[in-house]
Amino acid sequence: MSSEYFTDAELSCRCGCGFKITNKVFLRKLDFVREDVDEPLILNSAARCKKHNKSIGGARNSAHALADPVAVDIRCKNSRLRYKIVGAAYREGFRRIEVSGKRKGVNTMAWIHVDSATEDTGHQQDVLF
């Protein structure tokens, strides 16, 4: 395990194929976010193999499914936690942050996506989406 706070199972593709996040720089930044927020964080999604990413309707060039995956979706139970996560991610140098909230009539959990994908992999930098 390369993370102080997240297990290999949490960082792995949900299909069970064994594909997982191993990028030490990314994992350290994720640990810093956890320390800054100062409460447990639950990952809705981490690494995804190409097959699983396609099966769930993930983006074709998803940072979750890169050869060296560098993306997680962190579950948010309330707006205060969402605020803390976004602030911590920004302070830790994440340059790509997505905020998703519950939509009326849609039973989905709100989450924050953070990734370290680069322009070299076709991912725009300094974005909040």
Image (tube, grey):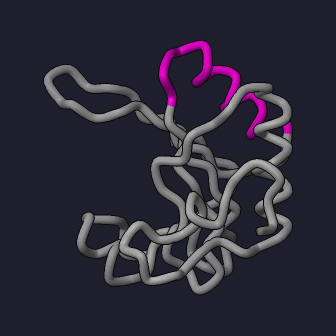
Residue 110 spot, x, y in % from top left: 41, 31
- Can residue 63 be seen here? The reply is no
The residue at 67%/59% (across/down) is: 7
The residue at 70%/23% (across/down) is: 84
Question: Looking at the picture, does residue 118 appear above or below residue 79?
Answer: below
Foreground: 82 or 97?
82
Residue 1 spot, x, y in % from top left: 77, 68
Q: Residue furthest left?
A: 105
Question: Looking at the picture, does residue 5 appear above or below residue 112?
Answer: below
Foreground: 22 or 67?
22
The residue at 69%/49% (across/down) is: 126
User: Residue 107: within the magenta?
Assistant: no
Q: Is residue 7 left or right of residue 4?
A: left
The residue at 69%/53% (across/down) is: 6
Residue 98 spot, x, y in % from top left: 53, 43
Question: Looking at the picture, does residue 116 appear above or below residue 118?
Answer: above
Foreground: 1 or 101?
1
- Can residue 103 be seen here? The reply is yes
User: Residue 81: within the magenta?
Assistant: yes
Question: Looking at the picture, does residue 97 appear above or below residue 19?
Answer: above
Predominant SS along the magenta part? helix
Tag count: 0
The residue range painted magenta reads: 76-91
Q: Is residue 121 left or right of residue 38?
A: left
Q: Is residue 117 left or right of residue 31?
A: left
Foreground: 115 or 4?
4
